[in-house]
Image (cartoon, rainbow, N blue to C red):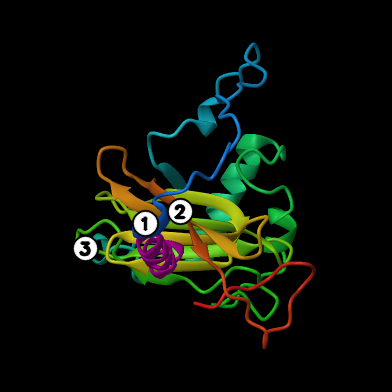
């Protein structure tokens, strides 16, 4: 983060002042800085139950129905809206509307999409973005279903060798920003501190066939003063 670079001149200034005084009075004690306490573990006797089979990571989720027109081109030419429809419908059926796999409001939101190629003006499915995330020279499909103007269901799909479609990333959250570079996909989300945004970096894991979380960091979040805010949230400048 940028805070570490900003701290360098401050540290240099402190060292300069200290060096200037050392030959006269020597190093001075700052006094008692307090007692250092060891971390305290809360609720040691309470443990979470094991995850349900649908929540265990390890394999990509097949999307029933859609096929790719040319497996050598990956997801290029695939109807993105049809893939999202099939994927969300399968998840809603599997979790019974509990919200474990997908937001229960997703079906109502998808109902706003027409049979037009882009789903029509009220369709909450974002335009699909093609990008090679697996490094095999074929494009993956990145899209998202906006639920309520704040929460979204981020989905990433890949084409299998048999022409079927598999979901390799599903992420529900407040998408402050989504960025791709080479085989990385970064998701930026707001935190409780408006000065910072959480950045989740996902990379392709050929062992699991999934986009796996590789790094979670904080980044400074300058507020866009010229952009109206919705609700009490803030937007970040990138």
> How many numbered markers are drawn?
3
Q: CA distance from mark 2 to mark 3?
A: 35 Å
Frontmost of labels 2 and 1 is 1
Q: Residue at x 60, y 18 (%)?
A: 49
Q: CA distance from mark 1 to mark 3?
A: 70 Å
Q: CA distance from mark 2 to mark 1?
A: 39 Å
Q: Is residue 49 above or below residue 35?
A: above
Query: Label 3 near label 2: C-beta < 8 Å?
Result: no
| SS at circle 1 | helix
Q: Which residue is mark 2?
A: 217
Q: Quadrant location of residue 99?
A: top right
Q: Nearer the viewer, residue 7 or 1?
A: 7
Q: Nearer the viewer, residue 5 or 166?
A: 5
| SS at circle 2 | strand
Mark 3 burial class by Cα count in 10 Å: few <14, some 14-19, many 20+: some
Q: Nearer the viewer, residue 94 or 134?
A: 134
Q: Is residue 229 above or below residue 213?
A: below
Range shown magenta: 3-21
Q: Is residue 198 above or below residue 114?
A: above
Q: Residue at x 41, y 49 (%)?
A: 27
Q: Nearer the viewer, residue 199 or 142?
A: 199
Q: Which residue is mark 3?
A: 72
Res 78 visible? no
Q: Residue at x 67, y 81 (%)?
A: 121
Q: Which residue is mark 1?
A: 22
């Amino acid at each position: 983060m940028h805070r570490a670079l900003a701290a360098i001149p401050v540290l240099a200034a402190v060292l300069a002042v200290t060096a200037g005084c050392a030959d006269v009075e020597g190093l001075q004690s700052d006094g008692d800085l307090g007692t250092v306490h060891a971390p305290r573990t809360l609720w040691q006797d309470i443990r979470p139950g094991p995850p349900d089979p649908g929540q265990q990571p390890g394999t990509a989720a097949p999307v029933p129905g859609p096929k790719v027109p040319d497996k050598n081109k990956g997801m290029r030419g695939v109807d993105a809206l049809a893939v999202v429809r099939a994927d969300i419908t399968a998840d809603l059926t599997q979790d019974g509307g509990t919200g474990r796999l997908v937001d229960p409001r997703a079906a109502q939101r998808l109902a706003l999409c027409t049979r037009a190629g882009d789903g029509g003006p009220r369709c909450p499915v974002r335009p699909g973005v093609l990008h090679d995330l697996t490094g095999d020279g074929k494009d993956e499909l990145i899209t998202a279903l906006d639920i309520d103007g704040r929460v979204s269901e981020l989905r990433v799909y890949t084409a299998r060798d048999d022409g079927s479609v598999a979901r390799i990333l599903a992420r529900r959250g407040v998408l402050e920003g989504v960025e791709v570079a080479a085989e990385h996909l970064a998701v930026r989300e707001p935190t409780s501190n408006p000065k910072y945004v959480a950045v989740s970096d996902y990379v392709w894991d050929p062992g699991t066939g999934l986009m796996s979380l590789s790094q979670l960091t904080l980044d400074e979040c300058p507020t866009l003063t010229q952009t109206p805010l919705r609700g009490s949230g803030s937007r970040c400048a990138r």
